[in-house]
Amino acid sequence: MQTPFDPSTTSIDRSAYNSRAHKMNSTTRSRLREWLSPTSFRSCLAEFISTFFFVFAAVGSTISARMLTPDMTSEAASLVATALAQAFALFAAVYIAADVSGGHVNPAVTFGFAVAGHISVPVAILYWISQMVGATLSCLLLRVSSAGQEIPTTEIGTEMTGFGGAVVESAITFLLVYTVYVAADPRGGGMRRRREVAGPLAVGLAAGACVLAAGSLTGGSMNPARSFGTAVVSGNFKNQEVYWVGPLVGAALAALVHQMLVFPPAITDPADSTSTV
């Protein structure tokens, strides 16, 4: 037997549908306003400036070392010089952007924060764009201002495979991003340390140590923007996937280990929430 048509039911369903659609549109508009707000613009600008500065120092120090010691492949002092330059530059870059954007300076760091849910995916994409544009423009400026000096790219060692290079990049990026989390997590006093400059300093020292450890193996990038910028300006994209897959995997693992194992979300015991008189 066919159920008789009930106009009131259709009206209720249509009203509920319109209500849900209105809420979705309202949420979309509010998020769009948030992503295009002056605050978001300032954050992206801070990431652009800090990444520009870091990559300029990292790549520029390599160019300078090569000009002073042409046979830099056998010169350990060149590796130490570039590692120190990157450590100091990252320390300063994180410090100048920390209070505006969080001082990521690195798509891998941004990816780790997105995996852990600390920033939204659209904001992470805006950060990535800012970081890669900043890195590319800094390399372009070095190319123009250094009278056409070749822009050094990050390359894996001749005896290494792409998989081995990705594993190395994943390991050192894990150490870097884990240090970032420890320096920034207020549960471990990170915000206090960051205001006292020790947080960015720890991040810079971790990066310098990783460059010393892996510089002769993969170049010690840990930063897809840095590798991308040099590749774009030099036109050499060989093994570029190593410097994306490795750092992103390492950053995601660091975020999950820190957030789920070392500093897991607090679990409230129902018995603790009951009060007795």
Image: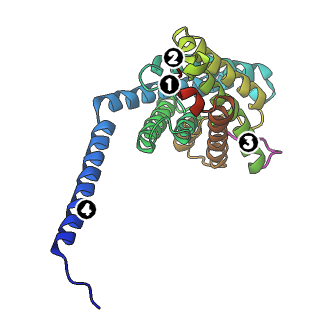
Disc 3, SS: loop
Mark 1 vs 2: CB contact within 8 A: yes
- Structural distance between the alpha carbons of marks 3 and 2: 30 Å
Mark 4 vs 3: CB contact within 8 A: no
Checking the image for residue 103, the label placed there is 1
> Which is nearer the N-term, disc 4 or disc 3?
4
x and y percent of residue 21 in the render? 26, 57
Is residue 90 in sight in this rendering?
A: no
Q: Magenta span covers which residues?
A: 154-161
> Which is nearer the N-term, disc 3 or disc 2?
2
- Structural distance between the alpha carbons of marks 4 and 2: 48 Å
Instruction: Give the farthest residue toward the bottom.
Output: 1
Q: Which residue is mark 3?
A: 156
Please tell me how many numbered marks the rendered image carries: 4
Disc 1, SS: loop
Q: Residue at x 64, y 43 (%)?
A: 243
Q: Which residue is mark 2?
A: 95
- Structural distance between the alpha carbons of marks 1 and 3: 28 Å
Disc 2, SS: helix
Of 238 and 165, the residue lying toward us: 165
Q: Which residue is mark 4?
A: 17
Q: Amino acid at mark 2?
A: Tyr
Q: Nearer the viewer, mark 4 or mark 3?
A: 4
